[in-house]
């Protein structure tokens, strides 16, 4: 880390290069409402940020407070290094990053008109009109009011009128929804990790026998429903593993520790202490830090950690005893 110089925000246009900003970047007068912020070198903003436009041309960057930008939050495609927003991020226009070598992380929600992200970790949810994601991990939901495009990602769930999928898409929850039938390529495969033993995988241990990933057939598992009220009628397509898990109540999902893991990821910097999932394969506490959770899900997405498929067999006698 460079020896950062403390800077006091006074200019209407601000260029940050090896600076630490105490107290954040907030307007004090009307002329500062149109302030453009350019990050040209290592920067730490200790507090919230308000800008007319935010352009990130270099890394690392860390913003500890909430961020709101009137126009675009743009990360240059040649940025290399870590860029971290620790609180909620919002833009009246767009949030855009196509930087393949940038380790971009949002530890809370993103809210904008359009969102385009590559190689990004989002601990919260994304709310936008149009959303494009590639090689991303979103612990929460992807909620598009117009469309979503998802390629080779892990997401909690998604809801949108129009959805396009490509590559391997993994869900942390059982179901997804769209107004129109999901569009997909021949290479697309959709899986739910809702019954995967993520806790054991996080600790480097063997998965439980009654756990695993469940593939959702985009062709056969499409449940088409019509929603009607006094004024309008809408159709809804849902894709879910619920109908496949006949014996789901035979599985003790609490022992997988998935809920604890995902909650720790979503709460992020709001937690007052660092929790752990117990002892890992090396005899050390499996601490639930944001960096470690990020690396874990990216390892799953890139195939460095394998999630076994769920065995669909069950004992009918055991099932009968639970009825």
Image (cartoon, grey):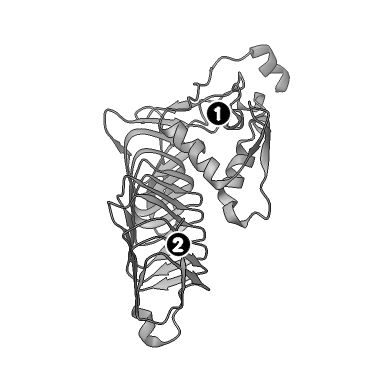
Residue neighbourhood size for the residue with mark 1, other residues' Cα within 10 Å, grouped as few (<14), some (14–19), many (≥20): many
What residue is drawn where x is 59% and y is 45%? Answer: 289
What residue is drawn where x is 68% and y is 30%? Answer: 255
Label drawn at residue 196: 1
Q: In screen coordinates, is 278 left or right of 182?
A: right
Label 1 sits on a secondary structure element that is loop
Residue 31 percent location from the top left of the image: 36, 86
Residue neighbourhood size for the residue with mark 2, other residues' Cα within 10 Å, grouped as few (<14), some (14–19), many (≥20): many
Residue 60 percent location from the top left of the image: 41, 55
The residue nearer to you, when weighing 110 against 58, is 58
Q: Residue furthest front?
A: 3
Tell me the quarter of the picture where residue 70 sits.
Answer: bottom left
Position of residue 305 relative to residue 122, above or below, is above
Label 2 sits on a secondary structure element that is strand
Residue assigned mark 2:
89
Tell me the quarter of the picture where residue 319 sits.
Answer: top right
Q: In screen coordinates, is 121 left or right of 209?
A: left
What residue is drawn where x is 67% and y is 33%? Answer: 284
Task: Give how far apart the Cα atoms at labels 2 and 1 are.
Answer: 30 Å
* Number of marks drawn: 2
Q: In screen coordinates, is 206 left or right of 184?
A: right
- Return the disc, 2 or 1, that comes first in the chain's sequence: 2
Position of residue 264 relative to residue 113, above or below, is above
The residue nearer to you, when weighing 3 against 278, is 3
């Amino acid at each position: 880390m460079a020896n950062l110089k403390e800077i006091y925000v006074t200019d209407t246009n601000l260029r940050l290069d090896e600076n630490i900003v105490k107290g954040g970047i907030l307007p004090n007068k009307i002329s500062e409402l149109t302030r453009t912020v350019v990050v040209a070198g290592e920067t730490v903003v200790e507090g919230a940020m308000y800008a007319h436009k935010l352009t990130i041309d270099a890394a690392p960057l860390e913003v500890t407070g909430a961020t709101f930008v009137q126009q675009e939050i743009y990360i240059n495609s040649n940025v290399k290094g870590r860029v971290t927003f620790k609180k909620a991020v919002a833009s009246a226009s767009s949030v855009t990053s196509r930087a393949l070598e940038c380790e971009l992380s949002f530890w809370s929600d993103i809210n904008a008109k359009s969102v385009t992200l590559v190689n990004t970790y989002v601990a919260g949810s994304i709310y936008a009109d149009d959303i494009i994601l590639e090689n991303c991990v979103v612990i929460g939901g992807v909620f598009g009011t117009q469309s979503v495009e998802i390629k080779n990602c892990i997401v909690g769930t998604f809801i949108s009128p129009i959805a396009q999928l490509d590559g391997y898409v993994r869900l942390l929850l059982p179901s997804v929804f769209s107004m129109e039938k999901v569009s997909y390529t021949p290479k697309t495969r959709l899986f739910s990790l809702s019954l995967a033993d993520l806790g054991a995988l996080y600790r480097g241990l063997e998965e439980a026998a009654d756990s695993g990933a469940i593939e959702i057939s985009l062709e056969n598992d499409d449940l088409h429903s019509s929603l009607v009220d006094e004024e309008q009628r809408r159709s809804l397509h849902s894709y879910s593993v619920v109908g496949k898990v006949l014996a789901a109540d035979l599985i003790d999902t609490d022992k997988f520790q998935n809920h604890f893991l995902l909650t720790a990821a979503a709460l992020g910097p709001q937690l007052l202490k660092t929790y752990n999932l117990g002892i890992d394969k090396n005899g050390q506490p499996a601490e639930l830090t944001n960096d470690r959770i990020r690396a874990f899900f990216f390892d799953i997405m890139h195939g460095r950690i394998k999630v076994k498929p769920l065995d669909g067999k069950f004992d009918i006698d055991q099932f009968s005893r639970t009825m």
